[in-house]
Amino acid sequence: MKIMESARSCLLSEGYANLSTRKVADQAGVSLSQIHYHFGGKQGMVLALLDHENERLVDRQRQMYAASEPLWRRYEQACDFLDDDLASGYVRVLQEMIAAGWSDALVAERVLTMLQGWMTLLEEVAGEAEQRIGSLGPFTAAELAVLVGTSFLGGEAMILLGDSGWTERVRTSLRRVGDLIRAWETRAD
């Protein structure tokens, strides 16, 4: 849909605070009233964009984690997906909406619902690992899911700030978790 493509493009170039439905309509070649008719305004348009992207990516992760590869390999693939998600603009859109949620309760509610979907998926994966390898150390599956999920969220925020040193530290640290998973799996086998 042209409106969603234009909304993504404008959001990435302008940020949420400077985004205008008029700019999106102009870029999409549609009347401003169409955006307001379909989405109710800027907030609804950006939430629809985030919903669409989030659904696609959660499905991608669910399929990847359902594969029969060892969990450490699937985790490495999740780290590789981070690069794709940064390049596509999804991470920026998500982080913009997290920031918007700090002052808008409706946005906060929608973003939290989306993030809880990610956490549920990670908890399922951690639960599978717990059944296969036994103990997750001092963590429950739910606690480990929150730890990994929030590590990615915080890491994404650090990467978006643009410091190459911190970007490398974040990427290396996230990948080191895969080394830990590999050690757990190897020990269990």
Image: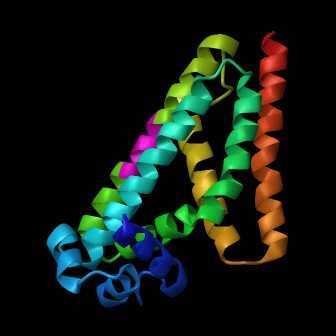
Magenta segment boundaries in residue numbering: 114-120
On-image quarter of the N terminus? bottom left
| In-image side of 127 versus 26 (left or right) | right
| In-image side of 106 versus 75 (left or right) | left
Among all residues in the image, which is located at the extreme front?
29
| In-image side of 181 versus 78 (left or right) | right
Where residue 44 appears, x then y in whole percent? Answer: 25, 69
Reply above or below: 32 against 181.
Answer: below
Could you say which quadrant of the image residue 186 lies in? top right
User: Is residue 99 in view from this perspective?
Assistant: no
| In-image side of 22 versus 157 (left or right) | left
Give the colour scheme of this rendering.
rainbow
Could you say which quadrant of the image residue 157 lies in? bottom right
Where residue 177 appears, x then y in whole percent? Answer: 76, 41
Q: Is residue 144 a member of the stretch shown in magenta?
A: no
On-image quarter of the C terminus? top right
Write the residue at 28% across / 78% down: 42
Along the line of sight, the residue nearer the viewer: 74 or 113 = 74
Where residue 146 appears, x then y in whole percent? Answer: 53, 43
Write the residue at 49% across / 87% down: 14
Write the residue at 82% across / 74% down: 164
The dominant secondary structure in magenta is helix
Where residue 172 appears, x then y in whole percent? Answer: 83, 54
User: Is residue 95 in view from this perspective?
Assistant: yes
Write the residue at 73% across / 47% down: 80
Reply above or below: 167 against 172.
Answer: below
